[in-house]
Image (cartoon, rainbow, N blue to C red):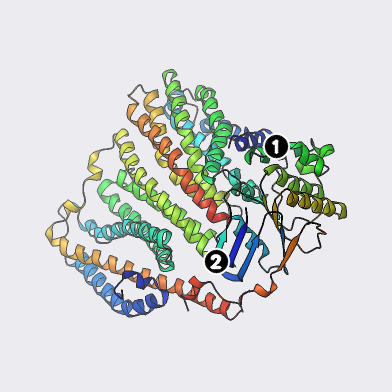
Amino acid sequence: MIALLVRDIQLALRAGGGLGLGLAFFLILTTLVPFGVGADRQLLGAIAPGILWLGALLSCLLSLDRLFALDFEDGSLDLIATSPIPLEGVVLVKALSHWLTTGLPLVLGSAPLGLMLHLPAHGFGWMILSLLIGTPALSMIGCFGAALCVGVKRGGLLLSLLVLPLYIPTLIFGADVARRGATGMSVETPLLLLGGISLAAIALIPLAAAACLRVNLR
Amino acid sequence: MAASIWQWANPVKFIRLSDRLIPPLSILTAICLCTGLIWGFFLTPDDARQGASVKILFVHVPSALMAINAWLMMLFTSLIWIIRRHHVSAFAAKAAAPIGVTMTVIALVTGAIWGKPIWGTYWVWDPRLTSFLILFLFYLGYLALWAAIEDDDTAADLTSILCLVGSVFALLSRYAVLFWSQGLHQPATFSADKETNISNVFWYPAVLCMAGFVLLFVTLVLVGCQTEIRARRGRALLMREGRLT
Amino acid sequence: MTVIATDLVVARAGRVLLEHISFSLHPGNALVLKGANGIGKTTLLRGIAGLQPLMAGKLSVTDDSHVYAGHQDGHKAMLSVAENLTFWSRVFKGPPIERALEQFDLVALRNRLAGTLSAGQKRRLALARLCVTGRKVWILDEPTVSLDDAGVDLFSKTIDAHLAQGGSALISTHIDLGLKAPFDILDLSPFRATPRALAMDEAFL
């Protein structure tokens, strides 16, 4: 499984791997917000947690459709499925590599972007913490959607339609942690719930996604 | 075991049974809906506070009820498909989805029309309304997945898995939305229980309307299942004759 | 390590293709599947490899004994030849890649990106992959496509060596491989199923 993780990260780093695309998209999205709503410091500061969470969520979505589709098209998914690695493990590794190459850069990138959106200073810690805990859930849930759509040609749009509603609870709790953190309220409840969603997704999604892959391979 | 419920999972027997059921069910549906709606719309007094606008609830409440029940039925039939692989079960889920999404839209639209005179706005981000909007999104995804996959059995498998996972997330979203609206300090008056506002004068036509919607749903699902079974039967026949390559 | 198939039924897209297929494949032996295009060779091999369900029949295979190679090579274009092989060797916990590189004449190409290889070279890399998996039962779907005469010769020698070491191979092909080791031919044409729908579809009639 480590071999698969190393390979996927190697591929992401090579040309055409798409590393950094998500981060660039996140930056552009955040840049566009003041053009849309005006550059008022107060307003931007108030909506910054929500914008950053939405931006992170959409950037995560961007690279999902290649998660299994590339391996499916060149036949290596067949070969991996007949290898000693269980498909549940494959799903877990794919989600982990997606998180390492997309989620983690977004977490780190949210700090300077928060600065640009006048996020209150005491909100930064909670912002980054909420993304750190929440993005693994985004990667796992996205992995499930990618496994569902792997057999569908040009399934990118379908994938968004399937995955975005599934993102709602994560977004609600994640953005709530960031918002409460920024306004100095207690974050304990949404933080625990967010952690719960992430852990449950890591535990249960591989089973569902592997089942989808088996159906799509036959 | 002649009385086993699973015998109706046989497509031919199912067609035979539903052929007998559909005419009386259709008539019963028409009677319930006509009486219920006419009684509700024209023969009940206007509400003291809400005026005539309250009468839209005779459509709103049953459709909202069926929107949720249709999803529950899809969850149930998806489970049967995954566990026992009865095709009729998968077809029932497929047939229920478009009806469910229509009910959701009716509930949302009638709710908005009702909300305008009562709340002064068509839409509020009230937990109940928001949950219905999310349910609508889940229906859309489910329908889109059915439409995107050519092979019947593959589509049935994948949509079943989506329905199971989606149900978990839909439930989670419901509670997340309750939590979220709390955080927004929405006035609680918006989510006042609608049923308690209905006095006995409204109760009987409302029950008739609900029965009518349930019957309508059952009838439409039966017809939808028949259509799917006949399409599949046509393909199987062509294949036996060797004319489908 | 023996593969025993009894009365297999193979179906694709709701259509029965082949039925009553029985064979046994012992260590040191090869079984060559022949048959016209579309008869169901690929579906049969995928079924035996565990990628899709066989409709009926009994198949006994030792767990984790086989490796499958299909029509598509499954190389990552942006990884070098050596990196591709190393990946598979690590996934299967197989032998190191050096011998396989030499065997398939890939040493000079080891640092080339797999995406820049010619079709025949890619095929050689796909065959080299089999050697680094360390698996005993090879399930190969038209392995000689795109190979030139020298490549086919190389392939036959590899199979011979694999069989000599107690391995076995199940190969679908249209050409004469020129194997020296003992092998059986299974012509699939007599097993073609009469046109009909699947048993579960017959419930609809």
Q: How many marks?
A: 2
The vertical placement of B175 against B58, above or below, is above
Left or right, residue C42 beside residue B148:
right
Q: Which amino acid does label 1 sit on?
A: Thr
Q: Which numbered dot is residue C57?
A: 2
Q: Which mark is residue C86?
A: 1
Between residue B49 and residue C77, name the one nearer to us.
Answer: C77
Q: Which of A91 and C155 is in front in this view?
A: C155
B32 relative position to A198: left or right: left
Residue C54, above or below C132: below
- For marks 1 and 2, the one nearer the N-term is 2
Question: Residue A200: where, in percent of width, then height?
Answer: 41, 39
Query: Quarter of the image containing the C terminus of chain A?
Result: bottom right
Distance between mark 1 and mark 2 Cα atoms: 37 Å
Q: Residue furthest top?
A: A121
Relative to B224, A76 lies left or right: right
Q: Position of residue B158 (x, y in %)?
A: 49, 56
Single out the residue that lies furthest toward the right.
C150
Q: Mark 2 lies on which chain?
A: C
Instruction: Give, as a three-letter code, the residue at label 2.
Output: Gly
Residue shown at 60%/59% (left/top)?
Answer: C47
| Residue A131, position as x, y percentages in the image | 47, 30
The residue marked by circle 1 belongs to what chain?
A: C
Q: Residue C70 at what x, y percent from top left?
A: 69, 54
Question: Pointer 1: residues within 10 angstroms few (<14), some, or many (20+)?
Answer: many
Q: Looking at the picture, does residue A152 appear above or below residue C17?
A: above
User: Position of C85 compared to B52: left or right?
Assistant: right
Residue drawn at the location 47% of the way across and 25% of the way down = A128
Look at the picture and state if B66 lies above or below A71: below
